[in-house]
Each structure stands twice: as structure tokens, then as C-alpha cells.
Amino acid sequence: MTSYGVILFHTTSSAMRAEKLLIKEGFNIKLIPTPREFSSDCGIAVRFDWGEYKRVKSVLDAARVEIGTICRI
Amino acid sequence: MIYLDNAATSWPKPPRVLKAMVDVLERAGGNPGRSGHRLSIEAARVMYDAREDIARFFNSDDPARVIFTNGATHAINIVLKGLLKPSDRVVTSAMEHNAVMRPLRSLEDRGLILDVVPCTSDGSLDINDIAKAVDSTTRLVVINHASNVAGTILSIGGVASIAHGAGALLLVDAAQTAGVLSIDMKACGIDFLAFTGHKGLQGPPGIGGLVIGDHVDTSQIEPLVQGGTGSQSELEEQPEHLPDKFESGTPNIVGIAGLRAGINWIMDRGIETIRAQEKELTVALIDGLSDIIGTKVYGTHDPERAVAIVSFTATGKHVSEIGLRLDEDHCILTRVGLHCAPAAHKTIGTFPEGTVRLAPGVFTTRDDISTVIVAIEKVIQS
């Protein structure tokens, strides 16, 4: 079973920015409603393959996208 | 019909603007950022793409610092009422619109110290007068980029240098210039850019924005409106994160889609092409009016120093009568009176009667101007 990571954001604007950047970089991601067990920060979260954690994080850090926490599901 | 009221609102709109507005309701009609379903997400994408395009258009790095408002007035009010404290000092010009003057006069009643720098009768601002007025106690300088009455362009870069040299911030009212003059926030040193979507940017009424410079500390600005943002819903306090801090309530996604389409249309046509066309029409208007006996044309008469706004009066005729006759007898739509800018009319010497304002737009032709000049001559001589 694939393990996913979920990136939480403070704003929808940041979530949209992250989605755009990560799709451009070829990542297999999906926007999902933020799972209630984590946070209600922003209604939308980005789900990615957990195996890509380091690469995803480095793309977002390099572009200085403001993110909340990253959780594993 | 010849529409010469583009300084109030541009008309007609490029067809792609109308199409984008219909399309967003059909295809992305959810509430952006509120829900996680596909229609909400698609609306959020439209909104974010618009932020990126606007940031790029004004050369600002951070799309999160593009705050959507219902127009320039709202954007100006966010800065004036959110940033300024009762004892702060503000410097502005004597050519401002009431979008700037009314909130400033209201704040003045509550203790704000306001210094209105006089301008010359053609609407120009002497940069030395700004330098004299601004000092280390000045918190903010507020200036229009071009006058909605005389069309006169003010030197933003020069004012920014003076403001920053004294440690003050600069708010620019770009209601009449966004979309017709190239605006580079970084090169000009603009800290706050207030713009509206429904004039030069070719978008619909009811949408505009405030672009906040990358270095501005937004923790010092109180939001004008507080409420739901779709984010941090567990908090009963307003979030600090941008753009949410200043964007409570359901956004005008239809307006945002139209605004984005308008900006893209401008980028496709080229702002230099638009500017060249406006200069040609402005020269034709000024030359044509100057040949009519009894008219007086205001402003600099120099298309390099003005946007396409030409104000005039005629001896022995009320401006309201000229406007009415142009509309009823010639189907030419203008705006007469004080144009919500009493300070500017006092400066150019046309208060309280006002002027007839002719404001061509991107769809106005040279032939339209020739027709207008003939009609004005008839009206004035009748």
C-alpha cells in the first residue's frame, strides 16, 4: 500500500502555489480536503507519495512557499 | 455611439473578459478555499493564477501580497485606515481624488496631521515641494499616478526616493494608469499600489486590488474587514497570513476571472501599443478643442506627461449643458462636473463648476475623435 504525505497550508493561496510548482516539477500530487485529524488550517491540502518527501520539500523550500506542517498518512 | 468616459469605467470590454466571467461560473463556480471539492479547488486555481498574473504585471515577487478588493477606493482605505495612527503625519498632493482625500480628511478629524502639497494649475507636482513637506516624522506619502481630472502624470520614482529617504512609505493610487502606463513596483519603489480592474485593466466593475511591496511589514496594518477566510477556522481571531488577513468574506471570483482576462488581453496587445494609441487620440483631442473658439483645455497639453484624459470648459456654456447636448444630440458620452476630485478642480481653477472630461479608451478611433470635435463645436456654437 502506498504511503502518502499531506502538506498543510495556512492559506489557500499557498496551497495553490504549491500545487502549481509541484505539478510543473512532475510530481504525482493531488489536492484533497484537509484531513480533520491533522488541522483545520486551510481547507485544502496537497497529498504526495511519501517516498518523494525530500524532493517535494526541497522544491517548496527553494521557492519559499509558506507551508504549515507535513504529515504522513 | 461614441463612449468617451473610460476614465470612469472602460467600455466596451474585450470579448474574452465576458467569456472568462461566464466560464468561471460554469466551470469553477465553487467558493474558493472554503471547501475541498473540485469546483472549490478550480475556483481557487483561477484566483491564484490571477494573483500571479497581477504580481507579474506590476513586477512584484509575491502573489500572496496581491490583495483583492472591490476597487481602488477599498484598497486605499485598507492602507490609510489600517496603517495610520491618530498622530501620524501624511503627505499628499492637491490633485487627489476623493478616494484618497475623504479617508484622509476623516482621519485628520481624529488627529492625523495632513500636509497637502500644492500643484501647479496644469496638475503638475514640483518634486521640490514634496521634498520640503516630507521629513523624518512622515509616516506615509500618498500620491496619484495620474489625475482623473487633467490626466497629468506625477513622478512616482522621484516621490518614492524622497519618501524612503525620510523613512516613510509610499502609497500610489494607480486608478487611472494601471493598464495604460507600465508600472514596475520595484523599479519605482512603490510600497502600496492601489488599482482598480474596471478602467485601464479592462476588467468588470467591482474588482480591484492592493499590491503590497515585498519588504513591507504587514503586521503593522490592521485589516479593514475581518471575518471568514476559509483558513485557520479554529481561530476566532483574524489570521496574520497573507493574503487572508486582508481578504475576509467570499471573494468576487467572477470579477477576478474577468480582471485576469483583461490583463492578459493587455499583455497580448502590448502596453506600449495602447499607450501610443492613447497619445495619438489625446493630441487629436487637444488640437481639435484648441481650434474651437471659446474653449479652454486644462492639463499639460503634453501627451508624454498625461494619460488620455482631456478636460475642457467653454465660455458662456455650463459643462452640464455641453454634456447633455453631446449625449442627446450626438450620442457622445462624457463626464461633466467635479469627477469626485474637488481638490484637483481647485488646483486647476475649475471649482465648483467643473469641466467636461473626455476620456478615450482602447476601442476609440481617430475617426471617433474627429466626429467628437465637430459635435463639440456645434454644441458650443448653438
Image: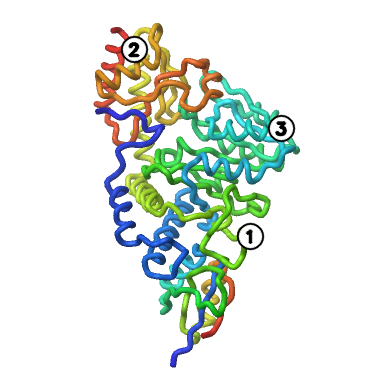
The answer to whether mark 1 and mark 3 are in CB contact below 8 A is: no
Residue B286 image offset from top left, x and y in percent:
37, 20
The residue sitting at 62% across, 41% down in the picture is B80
Q: Quadrant of residue B43?
A: bottom left
Foreground mark, 3 or 2, reads 3
- How many residues crowd mark 1 within 10 Å: few (<14), some (14–19), many (20+)? few
Q: Amino acid at mark 3?
A: Ile
Q: Quadrant of residue B317?
A: top left
> Sequence order check: which comes first, mark 3 or mark 2?
3
Nearest the camera: B129 or B204?
A: B204
Q: CA distance from mark 2 to mark 1?
A: 62 Å
Q: CA distance from mark 1 to mark 3?
A: 31 Å
Q: Residue at label 1?
A: B237
Q: Amino acid at mark 1?
A: Glu
Q: Residue at label 3?
A: B113
Residue B265 image offset from top left, x and y in percent:
33, 48
The answer to whether mark 2 and mark 1 are in CB contact below 8 A is: no
* Placement of B357 over or under B7, stated as above or below: above
> Sequence order check: which comes first, mark 1 or mark 3?
3
Do discs 3 and 2 belong to a common subunit?
yes
Foreground mark, 2 or 1, reads 1
Judging from the image, mark 2 belongs to the subunit labelled: B
Q: SS at mark 1?
A: loop
Residue B184 image offset from top left, x and y in percent:
51, 46
Q: Residue at label 2?
A: B291
Nearest the camera: A18 or B163?
A: A18
* Placement of B327 over or under B12, stated as above or below: above
Foreground mark, 1 or 3, reads 1
